[in-house]
Image (cartoon, rainbow, N blue to C red):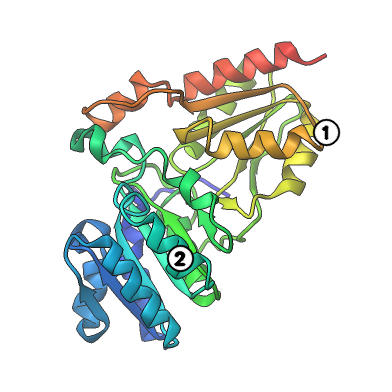
Amino acid sequence: MTTTQQPPAATREAFGPTLVRLAQEGLDIVVCDADLGVSTTAATFGKAFPQRFFTLGPAEANMIGIAAGLAAEGKVAWASTFAVFMPGRCFDQIRVSVAQPNLNVKLFASHGGISVGEDGISAQAIEDLALMCSLLNFTVVVPADVNETASAVEAASRAKGPFYIRAGRPKIPVIYEPGHKITLGKADRLREGRDVTIVASGIMVKMALDAAATLAERGIEARVLNMSTLRPLDGEALERAARETGAIVTAEEHLVHCGLGALVAQHLAARAPVPMGFVGMKDRYAESGRWDELLQKYDLTPDAIVRECEAVVRRKA
């Protein structure tokens, strides 16, 4: 891991350029788009490979069916739009046309979470990961920065089977160096610690590192795991963290009762139960506003992670 001198970038920015590179290398990639290609960066692929780029309008259910058909013909079929529309508007098509036949369809959903900001409550996807993790056969990934997103898009393109990759709208700090290689299904330990483990995904990973630095100044050493793959979950890393640090705090830009926190709790409850804390959206929808102000208002911050960590450490026997 590390920190880089690379300026902040949105995770969605890696999508189109990575597909262009992979297609130039020979992968038989096609892309289905729902009229949001400029925002998702899928349009970059469309400019380079117009014969492989299909603009289908704001008709996500139809888009999924066409992507499934292209995958059935042997293509590496990507479909992209905003997370609020996919899986929100086409869950049945994803379930029946992609998950059940286990087709080689890759879904790239940008503008996830409340950091979509001024687009407002109706555009904030905070349930999408619960929907996608409920489906069999899917690999579900939430990259921590733009370089991990590039690696996730490449890994999904080269692997067989359905993928869901969630990206964000705002420019966020870059953690990994260019060329970083994601290991699907494995948590990445970004910081050692003995007192508590912070398990984070997406935009919350950098906040977890900041929180760990603050905790260290207060005498608490926090391990930080980037759990970029939510399905399959790295149960081995979680059990080791529970045994070695004795407390777990999860951090996510999603509803905590059905996202990363719920997945981690379910796994550990049966294998290595320890005191746990949860940072994320808790039984409430957000509102329209600047993305950084929304994160502050709804306690998706390093300070919130610090408070949860201090609370679970106090609960340790």
Is 72 in front, or is 303?
A: 72
The x, y position of residue 300, in whole percent, is 43, 26
Quadrant location of residue 113?
top left
Q: Is residue 263 left or right of residue 203?
A: right
* Residue located at (25% from left, 67% from top): 33
The local crowd at label 2, few if under 14, some if 14 to 19, many if 20 or more residues have their Cα within 10 Å, is: few
The x, y position of residue 192, in whole percent, is 70, 37
N-term-proximal mark, 2 vs 1:
2
Q: Are marks 2 and 1 in contact (CB under 8 Å)?
A: no
Residue under numbered circle 2 = 96
The x, y position of residue 38, in whole percent, is 19, 61
Q: Is residue 19 left or right of residue 223?
A: left
- Does 106 sit above or below residue 235? below
Q: Of the residues shown, which amino acid type is indicated by label 2?
A: Val
Q: Circle 2 sits in a helix, a strand or a loop, which is it?
A: helix
* Residue located at (54% from left, 56% from top): 135
Q: Which mark is residue 243?
A: 1
The quarter of the image holding the C terminus is top right
Is there any visible trace of residue 178 in the rendered image? no
Is 101 in front, or is 79?
A: 101
- Does 186 sit above or below residue 160? above
Mark 2, mark 1: which one is toward the viewer?
2
The x, y position of residue 170, in whole percent, is 29, 43
- Does 106 sit above or below residue 128? below
Q: CA distance from mark 2 to mark 1?
A: 40 Å
* Residue located at (40% from left, 58% from top): 92
The local crowd at label 1, few if under 14, some if 14 to 19, many if 20 or more residues have their Cα within 10 Å, is: some
Q: Of the residues shown, which amino acid type is indicated by label 1?
A: Arg
Q: Which mark is residue 93?
A: none
Q: Circle 1 sits in a helix, a strand or a loop, which is it?
A: helix
Is 162 in front, or is 191?
A: 162
